[in-house]
Amino acid sequence: LRDPWKLAIPDRIPKGFRAKMKKPINNFLEPLVINRASKIIVVSEEMAKQYRQAYPKRNADDFVVIPNGFDAEDFDLIEPISFPEFTIIYAGKFLTGKSFRNPIPFFQAIKILKIKGISIHFKHVGEKNLDIVKLVEDIGIESQFESVGQLSYRNTISYMKGADILLLIGSGQETEQTGKIFDYLGCKRPIL
């Protein structure tokens, strides 16, 4: 499990028929999968701890931690995109719920810098989110924001390698082990 299954904290209260069916299906499927697996591989000690507590009948040694990582050589062949202005890149999902990555403090900081005459360009590489676009407009930094949209992994790395700074925002979930940090490290750029 790269991410928790039933143990995940939902970002928003699920609505609709599909949402109502998700919990009972997950409550049925996860124990079925966990209890039939020879071993359960997770990416963090915290996630292993929580799953050991959730499945006390399983041997604690059945939960194995293999942390995320990266191969530096994979990044060497990808050329960075050149940006003419000071650019901060965030690659991935941006949501404003309590369990996911909340950009509001960062956007407010960009607004303060804008007021002080310091121009920062922020590019979001990932699924376009209309709530984020509206938030950017409400804060008044739309001239400094670009939602690039989803790109191939290789093109995303090109963007990240060309950034002056890469932005990392945690979700606040104890089990979070974002793979993004390893991509950021592979790009050899400063991380905020």
Image (cartoon, rainbow, N blue to C red):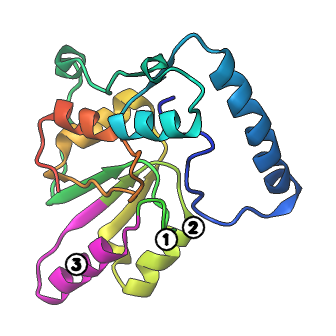
- For the residues marked 3 and 1, what is the alpha-carbon distance in whole angstroms? 16 Å
Indicate the secondary structure of the residue bearing disc 1.
helix
Residue under label 3: 109
Picture layout, residue 176 above or below residue 45: below
Q: Nearer the observer, disc 2 or disc 3?
A: 3
Number of numbered callouts drawn: 3
Residue at x-position 76% and y-position 49%: 23
At which x and y percent is residue 73?
Answer: 18, 14
For the magenta stretch, what is the residue range? 102-122
Residue at x-position 31% and y-position 58%: 169
Label 3 crowd (10 A; few <14 / some 14-19 / many >=20): few
Q: In the picture provided, is 32 more to the left or to the right than 113? A: right
Picture layout, residue 97 above or below residue 28: below
Q: Quadrant of the C terminus?
A: bottom left
* Quadrant of the image occupied by residue 118: bottom left
At which x and y percent is residue 39?
Answer: 52, 14
Residue type, mark 2 in image: Leu
Residue, far bottom: 115
Label 2 crowd (10 A; few <14 / some 14-19 / many >=20): few
Q: Nearer the observer, disc 3 or disc 1?
A: 3
At which x and y percent is residue 161?
Answer: 19, 38
Residue under label 1: 133
Residue 3 appears anywhere in the view = no
Residue 130 is labelled as 2
Residue type, mark 1 in image: Val
